[in-house]
Image (tube, helix red, strand yellow):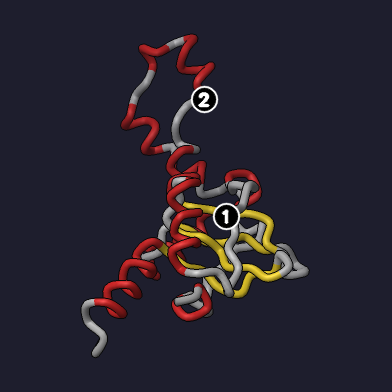
Amino acid sequence: MLVRDIMTRDIKTARPDTLIREVALVMCFHRISGMPVVAEDGSLVGVISEKDVLHAMFPQLEDYMHNPATLDFETMERGYKDVVSLRVEELMSTRVYTVDPEMPVLKAASAMFRHRIRRIPVAEDQRLVGIISVGDVHKAIFQENLHPEL
């Protein structure tokens, strides 16, 4: 089984200049935890995830080290309003791992496990063509091996 057989082709994407507020809305309403970030020319330039957004609410390690007693989680939670006013390019991960559509599914899964990510863009020549998640891999293997009538 190849990545192209299980990848999602209708992908929600963001642009680097998109407001985090818009990305959070898409993630919440479509029940996805991350999105590829593409430039105007369609090239893949990053990934933005819920983890990136929530991580931005926490103080930097050096700030915390200077004054650990000031860590107030309720205040941090209210800081979400400031975080959603940022642009994707300010929070996105620019180190993007991709897989090829002709790659075997378990090889793609091994890349996800190795890099500790739950979803991975599928790209050809740095152009986004799909995305797969750990759940997609598991579902496909289950269907092929234990429940072929699905």
SS at mark 1? strand
Q: Position of residue 105 (x, y in %)?
A: 46, 68
Q: Can you give x and y, in whole percent of width and height, for residue 124 in the image?
A: 68, 70
Q: Which amino acid does label 1 sit on?
A: Val
Question: Mark 2: which amino acid?
Answer: Gln
The residue indicated by pointer 1 is 47
In this view, the residue in front, 9 or 2, is 2
The foreground one among 104 and 130 is: 104
Say if 73 sits above or below 89 in the image.
above
The relative height of residue 97 versus residue 10 in the rendered view (above or below) is: above
Residue at the spot 31% in from the left edge and 80% down from the top edge: 144
Q: Please name the residue shown 47% across and 12% down the image.
A: 65
- The residue under label 2 is 60
Residue 67 x %, y %: 44, 11
10 Å neighbourhood of mark 2: few (<14), some, or many (≥20)?
A: few
Pointer 2 with pointer 1, Cβ within 8 A: no
Q: Say which of marks 2 and 1 sits in front.
A: 1
In the visual, does 49 lie left or right of 134?
right
Q: Which residue lies furthest to the right in this view?
A: 41
Q: How far apart are marks 2 and 1 (CA)?
A: 21 Å
Nearer the N terminus, badge 2 or badge 1? 1
Circle count: 2
